[in-house]
Image (cartoon, grey):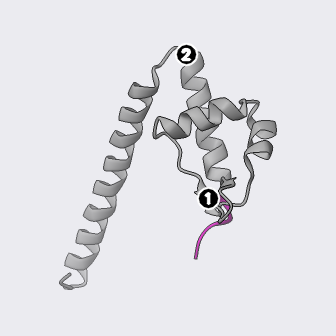
């Protein structure tokens, strides 16, 4: 079941109000591959609460002078760490319960 934080239901205008980021800046972060909104059939962007939190983190890093390319690298490193942790945990559970993939 998907968490409410991950459901893409928020429009770009509301994200603008919540974050204080301009719609143009939000679209720019999408263009740079930092955020991935869903699209409706008519092309309207839809964001989740997790996306809003991520945008706030991105904005904080940008204020600190961090380039978008470095933010993206950091995000990829974190995602890889999380994937590795999940694989290791899954392997430990499988080993404990004597299960094969």
- Give the alpha-carbon distance from disc 2 to disc 1, as whole Å: 31 Å
- Majority SS type along the magenta span: loop
Q: As drawn, which residue projects farthest toward the top?
A: 65
Q: Which one is in front in this view, the residue at disc 2 or the one at disc 1? A: 1
Mark closer to the chain start, 2 or 1: 1
78 vs 51, nearest the viewer: 51
Tell me the crowding category of disc 1: few under 14, some 14 to 19, or many 20 or more residues within 10 angstroms, Cα based: few
Q: Position of residue 2 (x, y in %)?
A: 59, 71
Residue at label 2? 64
Residue at label 1? 39
Q: Who's the residue at 47% across and 19% down the image?
A: 66
State which quadrant residue 26 falls in.
top right
Residue range in magenta is 1-5
Q: Compared to 40, does 79 lie above or below?
A: above
User: Is 71 included in the stretch rendered in magenta?
Assistant: no
Q: Secondary structure at mark 2?
A: loop
Q: Secondary structure at mark 1?
A: strand
Q: Position of residue 59 (x, y in %)?
A: 61, 27
Judge from the rendering whether residue 50 lies leftward or rightward of residue 86; answer left or right. Answer: right
User: Is 4 included in the stretch rendered in magenta?
Assistant: yes
Q: Who's the residue at 61% across and 48% down the image?
A: 51
State which quadrant residue 61 falls in.
top right
Q: Position of residue 32 (x, y in %)?
A: 47, 35
Q: Who's the residue at 68% across and 61% down the image?
A: 42
């Amino acid at each position: 079941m998907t968490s409410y934080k991950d459901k893409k239901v928020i429009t770009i205008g509301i994200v603008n109000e919540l974050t204080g980021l301009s719609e143009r800046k939000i679209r720019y972060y999408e263009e740079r591959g930092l955020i991935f909104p869903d699209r409706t059939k008519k092309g309207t962007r839809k964001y989740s609460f997790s996306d809003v939190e991520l945008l706030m983190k991105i904005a904080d890093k940008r204020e600190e002078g961090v380039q978008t390319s470095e933010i993206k690298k950091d995000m990829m490193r974190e995602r890889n760490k999380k994937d590795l942790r999940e694989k290791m945990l899954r392997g430990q559970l499988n080993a404990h319960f004597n299960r094969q993939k």
